[in-house]
Image (spheres, grey):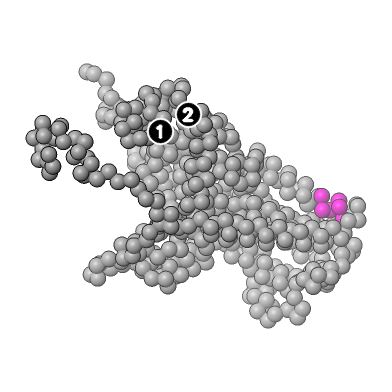
Amino acid sequence: MKFLLALVLVTALGLLAAAGTSLLGLYGLFAFWIPYAAILIFAVGMVVRVIRWARSPVPFRIPVTCGQQKSLPWIRTNALDNPHSGWGAVGRMALEILLFRSLFRNTRAAVLPKQRRIVFGPDKWLWFGALAFHWSLLVILLRHLRLFTAPVPGWVVGLESLDGFFQVGVPVFFASSVLFLAAGTFLLVRRLLSPQLRYISILGDYFAVVLLLGIGSTGFFLRHVLKTDVSAVKELAVGLVHFSPVASPDLHWLFYAHLFLVSVLFAYFPFSKLVHLGGIFLSPTRNLVNNNRAKRHVNPWDTPVPVHTYQEYEEEFRDKMVAAGIPVEGK
Amino acid sequence: MAEARFDEMDYYDQDELVQIRHDPPGGSWMDVPAEFRPGTWIYPAKPKHLEYLGFPNPRKWSPSDEDWKLPPNWKEILHEGMRERLEKYRSFRLFMDICVHCGACADKCHFFLGGGDPKNMPVLRAELLRSIYRKDFLLGRMAGSRDLKEVVVKEWLLLLLHCTDCSRWSVF
């Protein structure tokens, strides 16, 4: 149900842009006003979110880990999973962000009738699908720089030729486009098929992945089926960067749908779970050095705690203690 | 032979334990009220002990009662408590915000694996709070949010106290 609603929402948004441009002729609105507004909302929204996180302190070191902490010299420590130095924490974060290292551990639990007990097995599919999805999205984003820059930087050209290494089709199919659509579909289907995931999913979960798939598939369609006029797109994109955009009525409505969905994604970003882009860097369970035993950490508020001393305790219960034969200090 | 109590092994049918289902039912978890079966909740402290310690709202009650005799401003107390903790702990605010519901933690909690209550999936146990957080601290009425009602408090007491803070879910 929520998935269907998300699908209807994304389709309606795409059609809105198509109708707004080809029927109503609002080219300026969809070509630059909405994208500019979306970027502004994204930038301000993300800064506000990060500031709000950063303003809450981290009173204690709370890394969650499966590795041995540094203690005595003859106990072997796991410097990467349980870092005791800044560089260890950097390495742990890098592996987490670039390779989703902790998710690689993922297991699946099931009660098998034959064994008559619960059994655990490795489950790498989520790790693989998520990794493929995020990396291909990054490559696709970087590839789009060719539209916004003139001259195109060498590394973008290099990335593009690497991405189109297999040289299949004209124009060449990029590995990242195919991988992105496949991995996104996998994540969506996984969410739809697993009863546990369906139970925990909210509209936002479906909307985010359907929106990303909508952007991916319109982009794929533009490149390989419609073979859009790339020079006109580039003119608009370079114009956007230099704040002198010119909207072209010659561009296909599907292009405007693509651009509008991207704008929606950017504007939606700071209000959704997609803020994990910034949040992962601030995660206290991952980015802290585990030195609780080596260093004393005092929480910033350090509230004075009313103490009930032993003297006060004995004062209160002395009669009972004496009656029970418990030794007392005073009398 | 006397009937076995819930804290004795014979109370549980061994074959039944194998048949624990980990697939939640259809529908929304928000429509399922907390069920206080004997042995699944912690007994409240007696009024005299609370009074001695100076703790608020000492009263004689049990979680299985219909009326919990909450103080009249209980909503305000909970709201303030949540706000204070959001400002004190980055982990709380951050993890209220960035969970993507990937479901990797779902089958990691030993209470979920051993009991089968879908609200004991770590993600859903956090969602009990997150649904209120979305409403009161984020954007107001939106998908996945709900009002703070007495059923929510009952759910919190039952489900949040099932947790032993082992954090196993968080290492995956």
Q: Is residue B16 above or below residue A290?
A: above
Name the residue rendered at 66%, 57% in the picture: A45
Tell me which amino acid carries mark 2.
Answer: Pro
Disc 2 to disc 1: CB gap under 8 Å: yes
Main secondary structure type of the part rendered in magenta = helix
Q: Which residue is mark 2?
A: B71
Q: Which residue is mark 1?
A: B56
* Disc with the residue nearer the chain's start (2 vs 1): 1
Foreground of the two, A60 or B99 = A60
Is residue A147 located in the magenta-colored stretch of the structure?
no
Q: Quadrant of residue B31?
A: top right
Name the residue rendered at 87%, 67% in the picture: A246
Image x and y of residue A222, in percent: 78, 62
Foreground of the two, A312 or A143 = A312
Tell me which amino acid carries mark 1.
Answer: Pro
Residue reaching furthest to the front:
A331
Q: Residues within 10 Å of mark 1 (few under 14, many from 20)?
A: few
Foreground of the two, B57 or A124 = B57
**Magenta segment range?**
A16-21
Q: Is residue B102 visible?
A: no
Question: In the visual, does B168 lie left or right of A29?
Answer: left
Instruction: Find numbered disc 1 in the image and state the secondary structure of the residue it sits on.
Output: loop
Name the residue rendered at 62%, 57% in the picture: A48
Question: In the visual, does A122 lie left or right of A143?
Answer: left
Image x and y of residue B32, in percent: 52, 30
For the residues beneath circles 2 and 1, the answer to whether they share a chain is yes
Question: In the visual, does B134 lie left or right of A77?
Answer: right
